[in-house]
Structures are given as structure tokens and as C-alpha cells.
Amino acid sequence: MEKESTPSVNTSDNSSQYLLSMENISKEYYGNRVLKNVNFQVKPGEIHALIGENGAGKSTLMNILFGMPVIHNTGGFEGVMKILGQPIALHSPHEAMLAGIGMVHQEFMLIPDFNVTENVKIGREIGQSNTLSQLFGGLLEGMKWKQMSQEARAALDSIGMMNIDEYAMVAGMPIGYKQFVEIAREIDKTGIKLLVFDEPTAVLTESEAEKLLGIMRLIASKGIAIIFITHRLTEVMEVADSITILRDGEFVTRKAIKDTNVVEIAELMIGRKVEKLVDVAGEDTRQISDHTIALELKDYKVEMPGETVKGIDLKVREGEIFGFGGLAGQGKIGVINGIMGLYPASGEVFANGKKLDLTKLGEALRNGIAFVSEDRRGVGLLLGESIERNITFTSMQINDDFLKRIGFMKVLDTKRANAHAREMIKVLDIRCTGPQQTAGSLSGGNQQKVCLARALTMVPRILIVAEPTRGIDVGAKKLVLEYLAKINKDLGMTVIMISSELVELRSLCDRIAIVSEGKIFAIMKPDAPDAAYGLAMSGINPEEVTA
């Protein structure tokens, strides 16, 4: 087999102290600037943590590092990337691999029906010539299984995993073992210089996580640099040598771990001036009683892939604006999707004092709860139908609204449906040609307003909105948030908001539940210190931390 060439890197520049240097990196997606002149460096043998909220720019920066197609298919990026002081351009993950860059993914990239050796050596199998391959080509070569298993064994031993059998099938292995096989696969690659660990402990037990941190130290001791992406600040303090913090796509600081602490890191990760995105006069006139409960959860669990809820108890007061925040994949979306019957849920849910049957789809809708999904194109809208149809459809189905009786039949009251659609278009400032325009032809912001209009048409006692401003411009964001505040104040409607935008939650909500690892870690006031929010999102009790 012909040996592949490696992207050329001139190592003559011995003055550089960094294995990897990314300088003044900027990236724009369709007019939205997600990285702004970011600087990022990692030294050989250094464990360097990359920290930031959801949307801080971590994933985009790593996509640039790996030459991912999503970067090059959207206009590339600005700035310079260097390895050992020499500029290098990587146009694919394959080129990144040849340059000595590997990644241990949060979601396993293993083939369950293959054994450990096959997974470790996949894509780098060692061929063995035979008569058929000599006659008909290399595709018919056999495999040097003994040599491959020996090399897989050596990779496992190099990270201290002597107890993992190189012939064992991956299917059925403990999750921690699968993670270690992934690491062995990267270590086995020739010339590995840098490994990226993306939330590697997210699915591990406490003992497995501790073992993985030990493996990271062992790898770093061999001179291999590690980028450690995690939200677990205690792990950062335990294993990292240094840290880079990103916020809103911008570089905040690079610090040695010995020169900082978890409180400072949490504050820098979150810290920004919390400006009120909405300004509704007289909000203090609202009467919110601790004794009148709109929504109550008891030992509530949800089985949603990537958003599992592990048992929570919660009371949301009638008339308040209540927020759910936290990092992606921690369960905040799962909480709501379970209530709406979109995923299997257990425990007890009470809406306005009535217990809901969680096995029945539509139960929440029939009991005064309306929902605006975070997936407006997949769940929220009938894209091929008119705005009018989208606005009135759910109320028509659930409440028999916008129907009139002719004899024994119920037919659509077109005049009333059209009038209502026009009224909602006016109230929410939906930019369109009229009620008959298809929802799929609208901009993202206007689609979101249609989803909100449909929910409000139900005249709910509880309105749940998930990621209400995702993908819409600043002006539309302000209008949507102001309207949520207005209906809460004017109608006394209980509003529950789920958002990855902490600044939105803090500018609008009366209380905010931070969800971490499937549980409510803390319920916080919007004016709580930045550090307290950062620690809570990382699963750390501020009272247990000293600066």
C-alpha cells in the first residue's frame, strides 16, 4: 500500500513555544459573526481547557482546527493557524489527522459489531498480499490480524488499559471502556501531536471519569498536547495546566490554572452586563402568590435522547415568568418535551391543580398548556400551509374553535379564522403578504411569531416557549420578548421559558432553574452574581467554594 503524504510543516521555527497557535480567528455564518479575532494556543504536553457557555464559539473554533466541511462550505475563515510556528491550512479532517491532530468525541465513533482491534485500527488496517490481490488488486488483500492486534494491545497498554481485551466485541462494553477504546484509537495513529477531548466525562461514572483524567495526564506526559472541552470546572482545576475562556465568540483570557480559581473562571465565563432586553412599565404591579401553583412536578423523569431528566420536583407560581437554563444536553429541553407528551415521561405533573395523564399525547394542550417548540420547522409549523391555517390549526383540533355547525356537520368558519389571523399578524407584526402566504416562505423571525400566534390562539393559562429567539435578528428578538412580558402582565398568563441565552432569561424571568445532569441544580434570582450562575451551570454549589 502506498504511504500517504502528510501536510508539510516546517519545524525549523524553534522559537515558537506553541504546538498549536490560532491567531485572530474570525468566522461568519450567513452574516452572523460567531468568532471575532480569537487567539488560542496550546503548548506541547500541555492540558489546556477550553471553556465557555453554549454559543461561545468553542465548536466553531474546533471545526476550523479540524478543517471541517461546514467551515469551507460557508466561506472559510479569517486568521492564521500554525503548527510548531509554521502556518498550515487544513481543508479536511483527513488532513488534520495527517498533521497529527486527533479527537475523542463526546458521541462514540465506534462500530458496535467490530471488536476492539478492528475499531482501534479502522481506516489504518495493515494489509497482507495474497494470490488474489496480486492478480486482481489491493482490494482483495488479507489482513495482518496478529500485527494489528499487537498494535491495538500496545495502544491500550500505553494509556494503562491492560484490563481491556483487544479481541473483545465493542457491543455490550461498559460506556467507560468504549471511551478508552476511542482514546486508544487516536493514540495508535502515527505522529499524533494533539488530542481534543470534547466533554469526555459527560457519560462516565465518577470512577470512570477519574480514570480518564489520569489517562489524560499520562498522554500529556508523553509530550502530546491536549485540548480539554468541558463544563465541569472541578475537572478543569484538577487536570488542566491552563485555560482559555471564550464568551459570545470573543477571546476573554488565557490563564495558568495556578493563577485562577473556579469562582473567577465561572464569573469570566458568564460575566457581562445584564441589560434589560425588555422594558415593560409597571411590571411591579403583578401579583404573584406562593400559594397559587400553575405547574407542579413531582419525581418527574423524561427519557429523551441527549436530554434525559432524572427526577425533579418543582413548583411554578401562577402569573410568574419562570425560566429554565443550563448547558446543552443537560435536560432543560427534556423537561418541557416530556410535559407535552413528545417523549416518555414518568412521575406526577399537575397543571392548575389537575393531574395530567403523561401517556396521552395532547393532554397538556387540553388542560390549558400551550407550547412553542424550539424546532419550529420540524415540530412547530406546517410549512406548506398558510399562515392562517398555522395560527388556527391547533385550537381548531383541541378546542373545536373556528368551526361552525351546518346541520350535523362542523365546517371551518373561514371569515372568523381569517379575521383572527389578520389580528395576530397585526399584533405580532408578522411581516407577510397576508394570511394566505405559506409559513415556509417566511423568514425565521416571522416563522417564530407564527408559532407564538398559534400558541396564544389556544388562550392558555400556561404558555411554554422553548428557545423563542433562536435564529432571529435582534429586532425580532426584542419584539418577541416584549410580547411575552406584555401577555404575562396584561393577562396574568404564566410563562415558562427555556433558553440557552442566559442574558434573555435574566432580563425577563422572575426565577431561573439551572438544569445540570438531568436535575434542577439551583433556582436563582435574575440578579444573582455572574459567578453564581457560572458555578451552577457547572454543577458546583457556590457555598462550597472559596475564592
Image (spheres, rainbow, N blue to C red):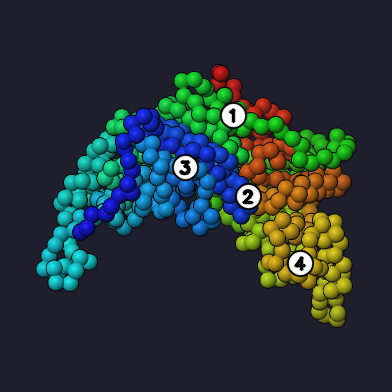
**Counting other residues with Cα less than 10 Å from the Cα at mark 3, is it few (<14), some (14-19), or many (20 or more)?**
some
Q: Earlier in the sequence, mark 4 or mark 1?
A: 1
Type of amino acid at the residue the image marks with label 3: Val
Q: Quadrant of the C terminus?
A: top right
Q: Earlier in the sequence, mark 3 or mark 1?
A: 3
Frontmost of labels 3 and 1 is 3
Frontmost of labels 4 and 1 is 1
Q: Earlier in the sequence, mark 3 or mark 2?
A: 2
- Residue at the image point whose x is 79% and y is 49% from the top: 479
Q: Earlier in the sequence, mark 1 or mark 2?
A: 2
Residue that label 2 marks: 32
Q: Quadrant of the N terminus?
A: bottom left
Type of amino acid at the residue the image marks with label 1: Leu
Mark 4–mark 2 CB contact (< 8 Å)? no
Q: Earlier in the sequence, mark 4 or mark 2?
A: 2
**Counting other residues with Cα less than 10 Å from the Cα at mark 4, is it few (<14), some (14-19), or many (20 or more)?**
many
Q: Residue furthest left?
A: 131
- Residue at the image point whose x is 27% and y is 54% from the top: 4
The answer to whether 457 appears left or right of 158 in the picture is: right
Type of amino acid at the residue the image marks with label 2: Asn
Residue 40 appears in the rendering: yes
Residue that label 1 marks: 268
Q: Earlier in the sequence, mark 3 or mark 4?
A: 3
For marks 4 and 1, give the CA distance: 43 Å
For marks 3 and 4, give the CA distance: 46 Å
Q: Mark number for residue 80?
A: 3
Q: Name the spot of residue 243 as percent of width and height, x first.
A: 48, 30
